[in-house]
Amino acid sequence: MIVPEGLFGTTGTAYMFDRRQLIRAAMAAPLACALPARALLTEARAATPPQDEATMVRFIAGLPKAEFHVHLEGTLEAEMKFALARRNGLKLPYADVAAMKRSYIYHDLPSFLKIYYDGMQVLLTEQDFYDLAYGYLGKAASQNVLYAEMFFDPQEHLKRGVPIEAVIGGITRARGDAAKRLGIESQLILCFMRDLSAESAMEALDAALPYKDQLVGVGLDSDEKGNPPEKFAEHFAKARAAGLHVTMHCDVNQENTLDHIRTALVDLKTERIDHGGNIVQSPELVALAKSLGIAFTVCPTFSGRVMEGGQPINALRKMLDAGLKVSVNSDDPAYMGSEYITQVLIRAQKDSALTPAELVRIERNAFGTAWIPPAQRDGYLARLTAYAESWGVAA
Ligand code: ES4
Ligand code: ZN
C-alpha cells in the first residue's frame, strides 16, 4: 500500500511526462470512450487485436468495465473541494487548486489517510454527497464503466455531525440519476474504519441498517496496523444476517498481512479481498482463495510493491498467472494523479505486459464477481464478449 517511488512527490516531472504521453496517445486515437456503447460494437473495422500503443489505448478506453474498489471520498477532486468549501462557507488552508494538489504527498498508508480524511471535511450536505457521487459516476461512465460498487466511510461523516440519511440519500439520488441519464448502474458498500473503535463501527452500522436496501455490502478500510479483521467479526456477522455482502481490505505490505488474509478468508468468510497482493507469498493461501472463488480488487496505482528476497515483484502479474480472480480498480483517483480506471488499466497494461485477452479476462472476472442478479451479469458479459470479438480477441 505504498505509493511507488517516483510516481508522486518530488519526482513529479517524470510522472507528468508519462501522463502527457498517455493523453497524447489517447488524443491521437479516436476516443472510443466518447462513443455510446452501441456504436462501439458496430464500429466498422477489421477484427484485429491491438498491435501498437495507440491502438492498445483505444482498445482499453472502449473496453466495457466494472469497478469495485473506489472510495467515493477518494474521488473528491481538488476543484470540487474548493467549490464545496465555498458553498458551505468554509476556508481551506490552500491558496488554490494547484497548491492543494501539491500537498498530496504521502509515503505510506497512514500518511495517505491523513490527507484523505482532511480532504473530506468539506462534505456536509445531501447535495454535497450527490455532487461527489454524480461526479465520479460521470467520469466512470465516460470511460465505459458499465457498473460500479463504490465504498464510503460513514463514520468520518457521522463524527462531523452529518446525518447518515444525508450521506446515503445524496449518493443514492446520484446513483439513480446516473443510471437514468448516463446508463451506468452502481451500488454502495459501507466501510468500517478499522482504526476507530469497534463501538464506533457498530454505531455506524446500526445507523445505516434502516437504509440497507440502498447498500449492497460492507467493507473494511483505513489503517490496518494493529487492526486485524477479527476486530469486526460481530459487525460482519450482523451485516451478513441483514443480507449484505462482505469484503475487506488487506492492504499490501502490512504487518501480519498473511494472517489477516487467512482470518478474512477462513474465519470471517469474506467474499472479496481488496488489494491482497501479498497472497502471492503463500501458495497455500492462493490455493485456498482459488478454491473459495475469492475475488481480488487490485489497485495498481496504490498497491505498493510486494517484496520478495529484497526485490520488488509484480503482484498483479503473479496473481493473474496463479489464476486468481483479479479485477483492476482506481481506489482513490483524486489523490493519485486523477487517474481513473482507463488510465489505471493503461498503466497496468504496460507495467504487467497485459495482453488484450488478459484485459478481457480482468473485466470478465469483474463482471463475474459483481453483486448483481444473473440477468444483469449475463447482459454485461454479452457486451464484453461482443466487444472482444469485434477486436478479434479470444474471450
Ligand atoms: C484506502 Cl487504499 C485504502 N486502504 C485503506 N483505507 C483506505 N481508505 C481510502 N483508501
Ligand atoms: Zn481502498
Image (cartoon, helix red, strand yellow):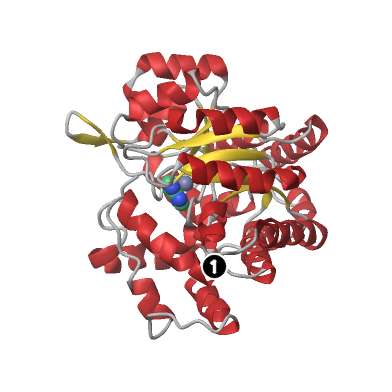
Q: Quadrant of the C terminus?
A: top right
Where disc 1 sits, the SS reads helix
Q: Residue furthest left?
A: 310
Side of 79 where 5 appears, left or right? left
How many residues crowd around disc 1 within 10 Å: few (fewer than 14), some, or many (20 or more)? few
Q: Residue at x 35, y 25 (%)?
A: 258
Which part of the image, by quadrant, shows the N terminus? top left
**Percent of width and height locating residue 195:** 40, 45
Given residues 353 and 187, the one toward you in this image is: 187
Residue 326: percent from left, percent from top: 51, 33
Along the line of sight, the residue nearer the viewer: 378 or 395: 378
- Residue occupied by mark 1: 27
Residue at mark 1: C-beta within 8 A of ligand 1: no
x and y percentages locating residue 157 in the rendered image: 55, 60
> Can you tell which quarter of the image residue 253 is in?
top left
Instruction: Measuring from the top left, give residue 84's x and y in whole percent.
Output: 57, 77
Up-down: is 264 above or below 303? above
Q: Residue at x 42, y 66 (%)?
A: 118
Q: Can residue 67 be seen in this view?
A: no
Q: Name the residue located 31 percent from the left edge and 61 percent from the top edge.
A: 8
Work out whether 278 lies above or below 223: above
Query: Is residue 136 visible from the viewing direction of this image?
Result: yes
Decide which of 281, 74 is in the foreground and name it: 74
Above or below residue 200? Residue 39 is below
Under mark 1, the amino acid is Met
Q: Toward the viewer: 183 or 46?
A: 183
